[in-house]
Image (cartoon, coloured by chain):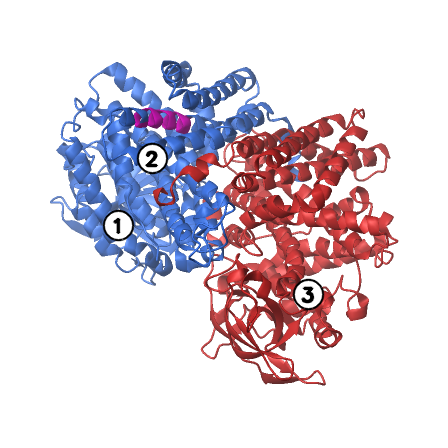
Chain colours: A blue, B red
């Protein structure tokens, strides 16, 4: 039987000890988030995730979604009830401003509980997840009337949302999209075209579905400069907010996918559907990016979530499965064999995952905190610095946490041997589910290109320089602290590789952009290694302080934290040198092969 | 539509140019394998793989196997016909000695064509694959009567074979197995117990299934010293070779797996089934290892096979899919966008896979050649050297080619973006199929342990020392060859890391075996990197010679070979330093965490 227990203690350690979230109580919404409130909220979320959502995960995968002949789509048994409980708990609007009906609590807290939800049931959580993205776009770009019409019901969860970008011939390159919007006399539009890969595109868990659709207004410029964003509700909404006629949008098919079977991935056909412009004409991409940036953080979180639940199951199996004897002599002589957790290679596997998830959790919450500061701080300088960091971290968080999340789900599956390959134990599902996170919301190669091609040089490299300084200062400040020098030494070495590679791009990629493309994925991972290493160094610092304070009850927890930090520096951080070597190899060998010789 | 074209030219380049297979025509069976015969055979195999087996691959995955209430198991549509064509082509017995009804051709050739077959349809090829393993065990350990009774029909393919090792509570640790064998007055045994994960355990493609079953004779010593191997046919065989009564072995269930859906993975129940001892009493493990060693090479080959077919499909997609523009300016200005193969990150992906598959192919054939020499050479010194190398390479080939084969299938899937995640394009199947190869025939952690704990120190390290000398000599001999120095420099650096890590184990793992376990997986991959690098250096040498000879028609092929060799040395080989760093970190951090703290 698969298991899941939300890592509440670890969340609280990061929020309280590492990030010192109390220091931000001058930000709107943060003063309500006292340590006690935070603990109560994450504990409540843990309960929902463990007791309601998780038990639906495996059955949801096995049952999947089915499109019926009439175009309706069924979701797995229990999903509706699970979804309703999530909505009734007010989780959708946790961090949405109170003026729109949300609770206005920190987005950081939303991220903290989001991890648990996706660990428990990624496919089910995608339904409200998409709604949250749509809410973000309407909050920023919607008219007052649109906000009034849509937000309260979406925050309540009785209406859900979707994002409609991809078409059969274009995903990454949205400039190619063909879905068209014809202006009507009343100011609305008629939308026609086909969208594919639309998560949560059709289902009957909610009374209405609010599709946000990218389309091209007749006569608009070609390419990305002629794309607009529209609200296309499944049911038209009357002036009094009640539901009217069925709109001209239908689900033509659902995809048969490798994983996330519990989520309906739809082909959506728009046939002169009524649509309402959101934001300015031809500015659809920037409106969509509000959703996209938030969605990318959410997808990065999914990578972490799946690695965490896969890890927990691998640990449980390793403690229970008896096979072979310890290399240093029997550890369970009364049993026919030792539990496999005695074997170093099993421990290497588990420590590698753990070193990732614990730092990944800190990385996620630290980034979410930047989002809060960027959106809520009264200080413009502070706001700008946080926004810089958020923009820089978004592709890294999405790309690295999902690549590694998948790798680690595979490693956890490996602990089960043959039992990991059969569907019964649930490990296959984690691997299959985790796989999508590397692809959607911008495939990870695109994240790497966003980082290298856009984010690095933005504002003359202001964001990256500030972060290098922050990490460098941290190393410098703790250099003479005997208990910290091991960690800062490892971090500093990684930082040096990162800075050298950044410099290499400046010298070699301006004249020859292929050199940037060729090194982009390695650079993204190099950056991720350093940021996760920075998280480890900060966690080590907090652990040292916790131990020094003599406060009792957490000594073991804090000592294990230091041990895992050491593991990271010894075993994981050296990868920065490899990434640097690959980047400096440049584009030559990979561009030289003629296309038809591949 | 998925595509597959067998890489015949590459196989021939390796066999003829790199390995110089003609030089071995003094070995039995090799004199029949003239260059023309080899070309004819691999071309015939290519045709069968491309035209018969491959078209059944995707449908086989979608349809899967079904166990009916009466305990029979159906295979996907067309599998029986595909299987029959494979058998009728004489492929099962290609390398089996002629005295038993085989063709006695080189095992190297069997490996060469085996790659194509598994690329085309891994799940289907597992049926004869298991038979081949069982044949190997009977050839070595069977009595004359057993050979006469079973081999001809198995080689013909009208009877198939299986391996029955795993039980619910034991896989790796076979010493725990409980299936029992009760001696009968007539010299036979009654076998009772349950085996799980039995590939090709039940189906009706063949008239009989010959199960090779590990069991414990009543009163035998505990642990691995009390295990014997038995032949348990599905139908008893009469004295005249005709089939008799149904034996007491039935399929209790089939597993629902992540992949290889076309292969029936069975729970087999033995209920006082008639069994016949093969080999000596209580020596079952060594008899089983004859199958296992051969099977491990076959499984390593599967890793290569899936990476190859996944690569081919990713290339086709990258040439066709239009998305975005080249960083160095439009390459297809007449089209709405460039094909994605213009993007460096896509090329990085494809080159990485290619650098692996081409070297992996050479590694496989070079290792298979060692098997031929070890089994067929008249020269005892030569035989022993080849057997040393074969034993050393087996865990590396299995572990590295399957780990990397899976990684590269994932990379190829990534090229497809969202289209890779839906089942329609077949990329998901490659990933799901490739995953099992890391697990079965000894999970890769066990391969690493076999390498570090057993193979390294065998005969005072004779095998490893000989190989280090061979690679070192190659570097030395080509050091002053200007055209080779780039490759030998890269190889030498990798070899230095490997030698240093080997030395580190000698110094640190004898007193503390956990240090060996902790570094075992990294060491296996470090070794794999160097061996693949050695293959690249040798291929580069052959390519240089080919170009220097002025023979026309292959210049482009040979130049691309050199380019890919360069890519390997620049981008892949530097990983040896990372592996070395991890090994030298030792076991401390991973053993220190208390088991209950994971």
Identify residue for label 1. A50
- On the image, the x and y values in percent for residue B590 come to 45, 38
Q: Callout 2: 10 Å neighbours few (<14), some, many (20+)? A: many
For residue B491, which quarter of the picture? top right
- On the image, the x and y values in percent for residue A428 come to 43, 53
Identify whether A56 is placed above or below B220. Answer: above
- On the image, the x and y values in percent for residue A13 come to 27, 32
For image coordinates 53% across by 28% down, the residue present is A579
Foreground mark, 3 or 1, reads: 3
The part of the chain drawn in magenta is: A531-543
Is disc 3 placed on a helix, strand or loop?
Answer: helix
Identify residue for label 2. A361
For residue A554, which quarter of the picture? top left
Query: Residue B137 — which label?
Result: 3
- Dots 1, 2 in contact, CB < 8 A: no
Q: State the CA–CA distance, disc 2 to disc 3.
A: 51 Å
Taking the image as shown, residue B374 lies to the left or right of residue A498, namely: right
Q: Callout 1: 10 Å neighbours few (<14), some, many (20+)? A: many
Q: Main secondary structure of the magenta part?
A: helix
Is disc 2 placed on a helix, strand or loop?
Answer: helix
- On the image, the x and y values in percent for residue B157 come to 68, 71
Membership of B49 in magenta stretch: no
Q: Callout 3: 10 Å neighbours few (<14), some, many (20+)? A: many
**Of callouts 1 and 2, the N-terminal one:** 1
Decide which of B349, B15 is in the foreground and name it. Answer: B15
Identify whether A50 is placed above or below B148. Answer: above
Membership of A539 in magenta stretch: yes
């Amino acid at each position: 039987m698969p298991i899941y227990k939300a890592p509440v203690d670890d969340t609280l350690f990061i929020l309280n000890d590492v990030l010192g979230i109390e220091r931000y109580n001058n930000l709107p919404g943060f003063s309500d988030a006292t340590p006690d409130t935070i603990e109560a909220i994450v504990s409540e979320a843990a309960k929902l995730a463990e007791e309601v959502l998780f038990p639906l995960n495996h059955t949801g995968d096995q049952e999947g979604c089915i499109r019926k002949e009439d175009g309706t789509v069924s979701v797995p048994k229990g999903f509706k009830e699970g979804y309703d409980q999530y909505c009734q708990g007010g989780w959708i609007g946790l961090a949405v401003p109170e003026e729109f009906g949300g609770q206005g609590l920190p987005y950081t807290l939303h991220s903290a509980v989001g991890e648990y939800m996706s660990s428990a049931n990624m496919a089910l959580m995608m339904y409200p997840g998409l709604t949250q993205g749509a809410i973000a776009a309407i909050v920023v770009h919607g008219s007052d009337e649109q906000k009034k019409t849509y937000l309260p019901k979406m925050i309540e969860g009785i209406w859900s949302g979707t994002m409609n970008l991809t078409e059969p011939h274009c995903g990454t390159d949205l400039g190619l999209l063909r879905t068209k919007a014809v202006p009507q006399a009343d100011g609305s539009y008629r939308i026609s075209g086909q969208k594919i890969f639309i998560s949560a595109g059709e289902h009957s868990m909610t009374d209405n579905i609010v599709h946000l659709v990218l389309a091209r207004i007749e006569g608009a410029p070609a390419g990305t400069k002629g794309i607009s964003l529209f609200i296309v509700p499944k049911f038209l909404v009357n002036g009094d907010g009640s539901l009217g006629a069925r709109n001209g949008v239908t689900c033509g098919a659902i995809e048969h996918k490798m994983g996330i079977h519990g989520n309906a991935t739809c082909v959506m056909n728009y046939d002169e559907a009524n649509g309402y412009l959101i934001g300015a004409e031809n500015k659809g991409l920037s409106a969509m990016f509000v959703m996209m940036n938030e969605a990318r953080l959410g997808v990065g979180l999914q990578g972490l979530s799946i690695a965490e639940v896969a890890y927990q199951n691998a640990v449980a199996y390793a403690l229970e499965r008896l096979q072979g004897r310890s290399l240093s002599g029997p550890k369970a002589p009364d049993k026919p064999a030792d539990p496999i957790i005695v074997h170093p290679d099993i421990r290497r596997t588990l420590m590698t995952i753990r070193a990732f998830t614990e730092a990944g959790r800190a990385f996620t919450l630290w980034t979410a905190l930047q989002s809060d500061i960027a959106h809520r701080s009264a200080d413009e300088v502070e706001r700008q610095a946080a926004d810089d960091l958020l923009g820089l971290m978004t592709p890294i968080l999405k790309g690295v946490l999902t690549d590694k999340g998948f790798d680690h789900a595979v490693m956890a599956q490996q602990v089960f041997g043959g039992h990991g390959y059969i569907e019964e134990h649930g490990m296959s599902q984690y691997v299959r589910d985790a796989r999508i996170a590397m692809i959607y919301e911008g495939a990870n190669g695109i994240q790497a290109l966003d980082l290298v091609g856009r984010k690095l040089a933005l504002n003359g490299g202001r964001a990256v320089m500030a972060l290098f300084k922050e990490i460098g200062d941290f190393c410098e400040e703790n250099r003479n602290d005997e208990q910290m020098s091991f960690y800062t030494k490892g971090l500093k070495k990684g930082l040096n590789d990162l800075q050298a590679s950044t410099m290499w791009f400046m010298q070699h990629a301006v004249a020859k952009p292929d050199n940037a493309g060729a090194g982009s994925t390695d650079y993204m991972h190099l950056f991720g290694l350093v940021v996760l290493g920075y998280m480890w160094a900060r966690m080590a610092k907090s652990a040292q302080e916790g131990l020094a304070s003599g406060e009792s009850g957490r000594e073991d927890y804090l000592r294990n934290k230091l041990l895992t930090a050491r593991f990271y520096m010894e075993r994981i951080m050296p990868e920065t040198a490899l990434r640097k070597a690959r980047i400096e190899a440049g584009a030559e060998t990979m561009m030289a092969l003629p296309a038809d010789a591949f």
